[in-house]
Amino acid sequence: MTALLQVENVSCGYGRSEVIHEVGMEVRQGETVCLIGPNGAGKSTLIKAITGLIRPGAGRIRFAGQDITAAPPPRRVEAGIALVPEGRGVLPTMTVEENLMLGGYVRRREIDIAAEMDRMMRLFPVLAERRSQTASTLSGGEQQQLVIARGLMSRPKLLILDEPSFGVAPLIVAQIFRTIRELAEAGTTILLVEQNANMALEVAQRGYVFESGRCVTSGATADLRENDLVREVYLGAAV
Ligand SMILES: Nc1ncnc2c1ncn2[C@@H]1O[C@H](COP(=O)(O)OP(=O)(O)OP(=O)(O)O)[C@@H](O)[C@H]1O
C-alpha cells in the first residue's frame, strides 16, 4: 500500500543548526502512528517540516502522491493536512461554535460548514452541550476536545496531534486518549506526537522512537512495547 505521508531522508533545523538528521517515516491511510521521544528529541521540528513551517535542508516529503517538500503551509492544509498544535490554543472569548467554524474556513471551498458542525456535535457531545459558551469556560479536557474537533472540521486526510496530553491532569489524559482511540476506530488517519509513551503506544498501531534528532527504532507498537530500550527509557520498566 502506498503511504499517505512519506518522509524520506529529511534533515532540517533552524538557521544553520540541524536538528533532524536524515529521518524517514511514513503514515498509511487509516493508520494511527506515534512519534515518541524525550524533550528536545526533535519531534515538533519534524512536524514543522511536515506542515511547512520550516523547509528541509535535504530529503523529500510526499503527501497523497504529491511532492510537498517546498509547498507553503496553506497548500498543505488544502491538500488535507491538519495540525492540532501543542498547547490548547482555543480562542477564549469566542464560543465553541465560533472556534469550530474557524477550523472549517481553512478549506472553505470544499467544506459544508453546517454539516461538519453537526458531525462534530455528534462526535463530541460535551461540545454540543456547551456550543454557545465561550471557550474560556471549558475545562482543560474540554478545550483539548475543542481543538481536536476544530482540526477535524476541515475534513483532513491526516490529523496531526502534537502533544495532546501536555499539561493536563491524568484523568483528562485518559479522556483525551479515549477520544483519539474513537477517532482512529472511525477511520481517521492520525500522526500522534507524544512524550507520554505509555499512552501513545497503547493507541497507535506503529511508532517511531526519536532521540537527538534521529529515529533510533521503529515498528509495530506491540513490538515496541516489548523492546528493551523502549521499556527501560520510556516505559520505566526494569529490563
Ligand atoms: N525555533 C527554534 N529555534 C532554534 N532551535 C530550536 C527552535 N525550536 C526548537 N529548537 C531546538 O530544536 C531541538 C528539538 O526541539 P523540538 O521542539 O523539535 O523537540 P521535541 O522532541 O518536540 O521536544 P518537546 O517535547 O519538548 O517539544 C531542541 O534542541 C530545541 O532547542
Image (tube, rainbow, N blue to C red):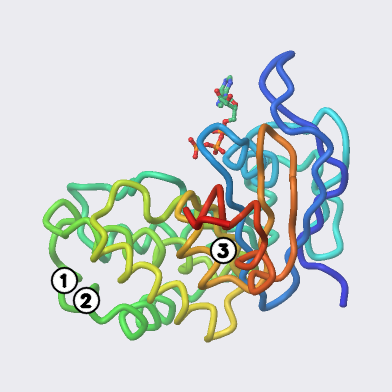
- Asked if 16 appears above or below 162 in the picture, the reply is above
The quarter in which the C terminus is drawn is bottom right
Query: Where residue 42 sits in the image (x, y, percent)?
Result: 62, 36
Residue carrying label 3: 159
- Asked if 54 appears above or below 200 in the picture, the reply is above
Rendered residue at 62%/44% (across/down): 47
Residue carrying label 1: 130
- Asked if 84 appears above or below 205 in the picture, the reply is above
Q: How dense is the environment of label 3, judged by Cα within 10 Å: few (below 14), some, or many (20 and up)?
A: many
Query: Where residue 77 sits in the image (x, y, percent)?
Result: 62, 54
Q: Residue furthest front?
A: 239
| Spatial separation of the CA atoms under disc 2 and disc 3 | 21 Å
Query: Where residue 232 sits in the image (x, y, percent)?
Result: 56, 51
Secondary structure beneath disc 1?
A: loop
Secondary structure beneath disc 3?
A: strand
Q: Residue furthest top?
A: 16
Ligand 1 visible in quadrant: top right
Q: Amino acid at mark 2?
A: Val
- Asked if 10 appears above or below 57 in the picture, the reply is below
Q: Amino acid at mark 1?
A: Arg
Residue carrying label 2: 126
Rendered residue at 30%/46% (across/down): 167
For the residues bearing labels 1 and 2, Cβ distance under 8 angstroms: yes
Secondary structure beneath disc 2?
A: helix
